[in-house]
Amino acid sequence: MTIEFPHDIPGTKFRAAFHALRDAIVAIPDDQLIPIKVDIEAAVTTVMGCLPQLERLRPEVVRVLPTHDLAPYNEIGTRALALGHAHALHKAAARPPEPIPDLVAAAGVVRTRLLTDITVLVNRNVLQGEPLKQLRGTTGFQNLASDLLFVATMLRTNWEKVKTKSAIDARELDDAEDLAERLTTAIGLREHAVKARLDATRTRHQAFTLFERGYQEVRRVIAFVRHYEGDLERIAPSLYRGRGGRGKTAKPTSNGASSSVSAGAVTPTEDVPITTTGESQ
């Protein structure tokens, strides 16, 4: 059966969860990062599906483990949502920016067309020509984007004067402004894409580590509290079924980034017992 990512959850909840845990996420050092060996969207979906049952078991958990630190248990839903947002940011950063040459070609055509219309309106004394001295010319991508936005704004500002005296459509101005914004964004992304991708990758890895630590603690709690029922996998199923375990903590590479290559299988964290005082041994 295919697990679907919980798209019905408002994006604001994902963002709010991420910002609520941001300090804890970014505080995780590279040498403590856990290799990502699961599908993140499937992992988030699995844990979100566990929340109702975990909530129902809360009174029993508190009764059996009255002194145990239940912070991970209590915030596992928030950690899952935070990971979902970090994953979305990573996907956005990894997405290649729009091809600049195509945007430049389109922007040049639209700039010329709108500037031609403005020139006609100036010659007919409908518009003042003085503002056109602010145009930067088409040398340089950013200059082209600025000029396109300028002529579109000039027409929009004087729309009541020009709408009946030219063939310009209001939608053309919307499209021109959108094109200028896309070109500006593409230029900025090209300049900052590498750093943005590295930052987003590290943040997602940190968010996964916080999430994975929390969920393994939840599984330890359920394994202890529900030992005789033996229903751990029904309540909080492993994220690593059929994957050979989660692997060891990543080791930092020479450039400071963490390696996602597993150093070998480890004893599943759910097998670490919890004593009756609520402490993990």
Image (cartoon, rainbow, N blue to C red):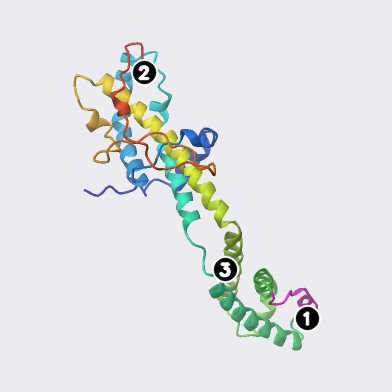
Please tell me which residue lies in front, 103 or 48. Answer: 103
Please tell me which residue lies in front, 91 or 259. Answer: 259
Is residue 259 shown above or below 115?
A: above
Q: Specify whether 77 is left or right of 122.
A: left
Label 3 to label 2, Cα distance in Å?
Answer: 56 Å
**Amino acid on which disc 2 is placed:** Ser
Q: Secondary structure at mark 1?
A: loop
| Residue 129 numbered mark, or none | 1
Label 1 to label 2, Cα distance in Å?
Answer: 77 Å
| Residue 280 numbered mark, or none | 2
Q: Secondary structure at mark 3?
A: helix
Is residue 239 shown above or below 142?
A: above
Q: Position of residue 96 (x, y in %)?
A: 49, 62
Give the mark nearer the N terminus: 1 vs 2: 1
- Decide if residue 57 is in sight here: no
Give the mark nearer the N terminus: 3 vs 2: 3
Q: What range is drawn magenta here?
A: 128-139
- Decide if residue 34 is in sight here: yes
Give the mark nearer the N terminus: 3 vs 1: 1
